[in-house]
Amino acid sequence: MPENVETTAAEITQGKGTSRRHFMGYLGLAGAGTALVACNPAPTPKPMTAAEKQDLEILNYALTLEYLEADFYNQFTGNGVNASKLSDPQVKQYAKEIAAHENSHVAALKQTILNLKGTPVAKPTFDFSPLIGNKPINDELFLALAATFEPIGVRAYLGQVARLSNPELIAVAGAIHAVEANHVSAVQELRVKLGHNKNALRQTDIAPQSVAKPTSLAAGDFDADYSPTPTALWKELTMAQVLEIVKPVIK
């Protein structure tokens, strides 16, 4: 894997909002749901410590990946641009349920950041066409992309959790990881059921990276075929690795 070198959001964005040019400090950690909202704001108006600032940077990092995941699933539900492309009832239901989870994560992370006296990063504009290419947009493609995004979230979280200092945020970290890991297993089980997963016994701790190119961060080298229960211990992704992976879908 590439060298584990972290870059803070403050260093990358220089205090500016999120865009294709300035988003780079905010892509990674998966959200945990409404439990995050319970995190208490600072008890006094004293200046933030370096650790408190880092916690907020990580939360905004998490928020941007949740924006990405929510945007992806929203495109396949309700009035989304690709909602009519799904045909299997169970695929539609999975899209709806996971979209609800991701939208809940966005709301919870934004509120938590506000509670901690921070400012939620603005939502970037996402374009998933580089991942779709000329492939037909259907159930199979949707599930393959979901099987790509979800383990990235799981592993991105693992790359940041040790940097959190707020005990309440650390306590909810297990919930963050569990939700995204549940998505991984659910999507892969459905892919197996529908005959889309061609290697359902493959064990891997680096999904969606492949056996052939295990260190590549290019989506074209990824392999979405792996077991619904792929590993006993996931390997983390660093912030820099995640940024490289998601860069093509940020306008």
Image (tube, rainbow, N blue to C red):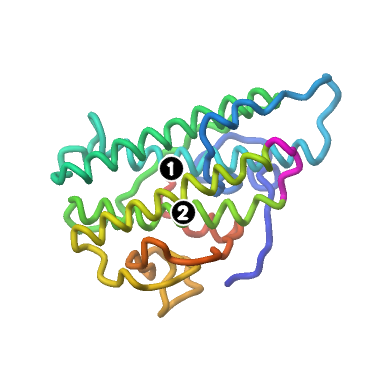
Q: Which residues are magenta?
A: 163-168
How packed mark 2 is, by other alpha carbons closer than 10 Å (few <14, some 14-19, many 20 or more), is many
Locate residue 50, reporting x and y percent: 81, 40
Find out whether the residues at labels 2 and 1 contact each other: C-beta distance under 8 Å: yes
Q: Is residue 167 magenta?
A: yes
Judge left or right: residue 84 versus residue 186. left
**Kind of residue sitting beneath label 2:** Val
Q: Residue furthest bottom?
A: 212
> How many numbered tags mark residues here?
2
> On screen, 192 above or below 26?
below
- Where does label 1 land, which residue? 68
Q: Residue at x 46, y 38 (%)?
A: 67
Please report the residue visible at 43 percent of the width from the left and 37 percent of the height from the top: 102
For disc 2, the marked residue is: 246
Q: On screen, 78 above or below 85?
A: above
> Residue 63's spot in the image, x, y percent?
54, 38
The answer to whether residue 139 is above or below residue 79 is below
* Residue 81, percent from left and from top: 23, 36
Q: Residue at x 21, y 44 (%)?
A: 90
Disc sitting over residue 26 in the figure: none
Query: Residue 85 lies in what quarter of the image?
Result: top left
Tell whether 98 sits left or right of 232: left
Does residue 20 show up magenta in the picture?
no
> Which of the pair 3/10 is nearer the observer?
3
Mark 2 or 1, nearer chain start:
1
